[in-house]
Image (spheres, helix red, strand yellow):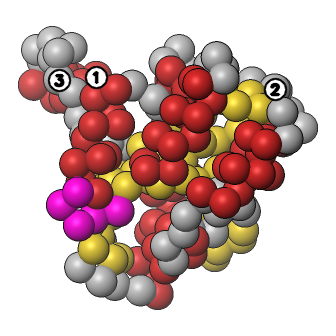
């Protein structure tokens, strides 16, 4: 989660958890929300600031282990690459090397736009390196949307929750759970437009 946006980050985590719970009713999906150091410190009543967790969610579908790191920002213009920490990238990369899939989910959340962009860790590294070569520390939202292969997750209505008297809304996670994609071609198109 993006530092300094604790309540926003927790809200995004809850949305993803609700979405995964919906998918569990339809498909063989298992997931685990990896607790952060604040949660662990509260449980064991000790400070664990040095604890570095691999990701926000570990998701398993059809025997494939997938790590998901969630980021949320209210920026109107762009996403800063430094919001994804190096140890997070390395953990996602290690899971990918071991045969799993690893995704970074970026929630763009301001009063006018609510979207989630999903890209694999390999694609994130490729984009970041390409932009760093051009002395850029962030990617504009319209540039991210133009890159072929970057998935835009849509909100959808799942089902009524009678126990809490509310409708469950969530994110369409099909592109993460059921497809693989690559963005090399789309990235070349964006970088050639400069």
* Few, some or many residues within 10 Å of mark 2 (<14, 14–19, 20+): few
Residue at left offset 52%, top offset 32%: 129
Marks 1/3: CA distance? Answer: 10 Å
- 104 in magenta: no
Q: Are marks 3 and 2 in contact (CB under 8 Å)?
A: no
Outermost residue toward the front in this view? 192
> Which residue does the numbered mark 3 point to in the structure image?
51
Q: In x, y percent, where is residue 28? A: 34, 84
Q: Nearer the viewer, residue 83 or 127?
A: 127
Q: Which residue is mark 1?
A: 38
Locate residue 66: give its quadrant: bottom left
- Pick the quarter of the image with the C terminus: top right
Q: Residue furthest right?
A: 112
Q: Give the Cα distance between marks 3 and 2.
A: 32 Å
Q: State whether the magenta stretch is mostly helix, strand or loop.
A: loop
Residue at the image position 46 percent from the left and 40 percent from the top: 125
Q: Pinpoint residue 121: horizontal percent, then vertical percent.
A: 43, 48
Tag 2 secondary structure: loop
Left or right of residue 135, residue 31 in this image: left
User: What is the crowding at mark 3: few (fewer than 14 residues within 10 Å), some, or many (at least 20)?
Assistant: few
Q: Judge from the rendering whether residue 29 lies leftward or rightward of residue 123; answer left or right.
A: left
Q: Residue at x 33, y 77 (%)?
A: 61
190 over 149 or under it: above or below: above
Q: Residue at x 58, y 40 (%)?
A: 127
- On screen, residue 126 above or below 98: above
Q: Which residues are magenta?
A: 97-101
């Amino acid at each position: 989660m993006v530092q300094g946006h604790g309540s926003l980050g927790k809200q995004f985590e809850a949305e993803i958890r609700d979405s995964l719970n919906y998918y569990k009713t339809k498909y063989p999906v298992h997931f685990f929300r990896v607790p952060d150091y604040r949660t662990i410190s509260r449980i064991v009543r000790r400070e664990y600031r040095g604890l570095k967790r691999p990701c926000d969610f570990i998701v398993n579908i059809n025997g494939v282990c997938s790590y998901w790191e969630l980021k949320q920002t209210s920026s109107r213009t762009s996403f800063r690459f430094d919001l994804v920490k190096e140890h997070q990238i390395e953990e996602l990369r290690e899971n990918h090397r071991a045969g799993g899939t690893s995704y970074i989910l970026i929630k763009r959340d301001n009063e006018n736009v609510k979207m989630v962009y999903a890209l694999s860790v390999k694609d994130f590294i490729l984009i970041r390196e390409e932009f760093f070569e051009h002395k850029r520390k962030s990617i504009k939202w319209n540039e991210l949307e133009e890159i072929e292969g970057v998935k835009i997750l849509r909100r959808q209505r799942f089902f009524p929750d009678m126990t809490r008297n509310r409708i469950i809304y969530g994110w369409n996670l099909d592109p993460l759970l059921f497809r693989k994609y690559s963005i090399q071609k789309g990235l070349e198109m964006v970088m050639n437009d400069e």
